Image (cartoon, grey):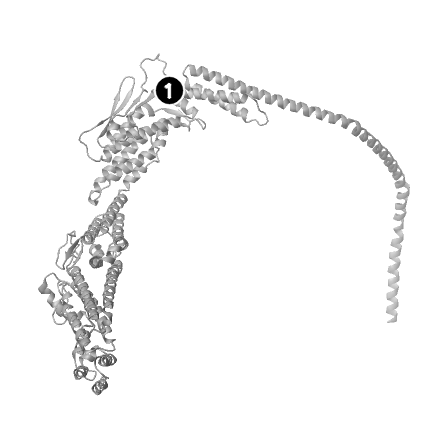
Amino acid sequence: LVAAVLAHSGRLDKEHLGARVGRLSRRGEVCTMINKKYSEFLPSMQSAEDLVAQVEGLANNIDLLKAGIENEVQRDLNVAVAEFTELKQQLERDTLVLSVLKKLQEFDTAIKECNSALLEKQYVTAAQQLEKARSSLRSLESRRGFELKILKALGTELTVQTQNIIYHLGEEWQKLIVWKLPPSKGSSSLEAVVLSELHLHTVPPQDEDTAVPPVAAVLQALAVLGELHSKLKDFGQLLLQYILKPLISHPSLQPVPEEQPDVFILRFRSQEFALDESSPMEVFDKIKLVFEVLHKHLLNVPLEQPGEGRKEGRVTLAELLGELIWEELSDCLIHNCLVNSIPTNSSKLEQYKEVIESTEEFEKALKKMQFLKEDTTALLKYACNVDSHFANKKCQDVIMAARNLMTSEIHNTVKITPDSSISLPELPDPGSGDHLKMHSPSSLLHNGTVNLGSESRLSPFTLSLPTCRISSSVQQLVELAYHTLLEATASTDLCCVQLFDCVRNIFQLFYEVVPTYHRENLQKLPQLAAIHHNNCMYIAHHLLTLGHQFRYRSTGVLSNGAATFVDLVPGFRRLGMECFLAQMRVQKGEILERLSSARNFSNMDDEENYCAANKAIKQVLHQLRRLGMVWQDVLPVNVYCKAMGALLNTALAEIVTRIAALEDISAEDADRLYSLCRIMVEEGPQVFTPLLEEDKNKKYQEEVPVYVHKWMTFKELMIILQANLQEIVDQWADGKGPLAEEFSAAEVKSLIRALFQNTERRAAALAKIK
């Protein structure tokens, strides 16, 4: 181990020695570097320092030079800039003055050329030069900060020249177009219109040497000056008022054009025999004739509109006039011609195709004359939409007729019976087993019968309206509804729906108008209330099947079950019942008020009290008789009997209540009360007179207990008033007798205590009443 260590250490010493010798050999390089630094670098550094000193000297010289420039050259430069700025401003002023002088020269030249052209009647040139002068003046006025006193004078001169040329052009316009109007201006009567004439001096003169300016020159000059619009507007209004509108309104008026060598004249003549209304074809022909002659002699003049591009701005006088008057003319044609030609019957709609074709030809002719633009078709659209207009017109007429019927008198009545025939339209058989018979029973089975176990059959009048009286206006209203629906079945889908909605509107209008319009009479007059009740029930009766009857005769729009009026039925029934019940409440109130004067039927032994009670009874009977008469042959028998029974029952119930409440009834009081009750029993049934035939009314008078619930109660009260204690006990029969059916035990005991003195017999009788 020791030997190994020693060997190893020996190797290390040898290696370290080699490295050291290598490093020592590099020390020569260090010497070389030191030599370069001190023998070569230091001299070059000395020369660089010398250069730095020279540069610093130059910098000092530059600073001195810069200071000299700032002190001397800058002062001279500021002076030069100021001089240059002044020269520039002077140049701008001179340029502005030169441009102003140039514009003044242009203005003066334009005014001179305008005057020269005006003297030679070269109106277009004059107008153009005047516009140049106006442009120059605007340019001068637009320069801010540069105002000349002469501008005001120039503006005045321009205005004078403008008015001068406008005056000359106005004279030329009046020479071209001469109106001869009737003395009474503004009159649209036929006599005044016939006197109107239009003279157009636009025919080219045969003598070419004559110094007459052409029509185009006058119109173009007016266009350049912007005056053509106002001239055309005035001309258009006169054309509408004295030519076009009269031709539409007066069928007998005919235009008579007359062409002479130097003038064209448009006159009118009136035909002696003419229809009340012209057909659209005739009106279109007359209007077309007027425009054709105007186009030939006046309107076919091309003009250049100032401002925009010349090609785009080139229009004819006809186009300008059309823009001014077409809207008013088309409205007049629609409202005074086409509206009247709309058929009132769907069968005539086919014939209206002629009107549509004529309208199309009329618009094409006006477009060819450039009076209308290509996209102007308002007139044709109206004519083509004839179905909608027909429906609107029909609906309007129907609603107006319906409203007149609703506001007519209610008391004009007709009698309705189950077997009566009413003038309603006979609908064709749709082939589905449905027939329109106003009061025929509906066929429930194919054989028309319904078996009810005992081989009995329904009455032929089943589901029919009972005999009663209704207003004739309501009958006509229902007929109107049927006729309108029949018209709907022959119309287009759109028209059919509109007419169906119109019929619904009729009944909804009735629901709102009649109760409001006739409110006062319905409240005061019992007969009118009864008639109104019948009217509502009559309408409801027809509404039940009205839609079904037309279901198979209408178009697909309504045949899917939507054509129904059943939803209106409850409202009409309620309307009739509420009105009649309100009248019943009024009558009941009057009955109770009259009975209130009977002094509670107490102390009848007093003659004054008896007379008051007797008077009250007779007044009630008189009221019932009067109601029986006014409702006679008006209300259906069953409604009549129920209504009279309810009123009589009110009177009897009040009498029973008052007598039963008495605490003391003497024998004489009982006799007199009985006599009063006997009056009611004897005369009460006599108020039941539902029919005009007296012998037929006995049946209903005998059935009074059926309609008057308190009738038997009242008769039992009469028995009590005349009976002794034993008879009363017998009538009670331990709570099983007729008396127990009408009165309670407490009421019977109260009557016994009032009628009889307090004795053992009364006590025994009271004991049995339980």
Q: Is residue 49 visible?
A: yes
Identity of the residue furthest to the left in this view: 695
Question: Vertically, is 759 above or below 629?
Answer: below
Closer to the camera in the image, 738 or 395: 738
Could you tell whether 76 is left or right of 593 in the image?
right
> Where residue 9 sits in the image (x, y, percent)?
87, 65
Question: Vertically, is 405 above or below 266?
Answer: below
Closer to the camera in the image, 635 or 24: 635
Closer to the camera in the image, 275 or 122: 275
Identity of the residue furthest to the front in this view: 607
Question: Vertically, is 85 above or below 360?
Answer: above
Residue topped by disc 1: 171
Question: Vertically, is 170 above or below 732?
Answer: above
Closer to the camera in the image, 412 or 157: 412
Residue that appears at 47% across and 16% down: 113
> Where residue 108 sits in the image (x, y, percent)?
51, 17
Label 1: few (<14), some or many (≥20) within 10 Å? few
Q: Secondary structure at mark 1?
A: helix
Q: Is residue 653 visible?
A: no
Assign the C terminus to one quadrant of the image. bottom left
Residue that appears at 68% across and 25% down: 85
Looking at the rendering, which quadrant does residue 456 occupy?
A: bottom left
Assign the N terminus to one quadrant of the image. bottom right
Three-letter amino acid code at the position of disc 1: Glu
Residue that appears at 40% across and 16% down: 121
> Where residue 451 sits in the image (x, y, percent)?
14, 68
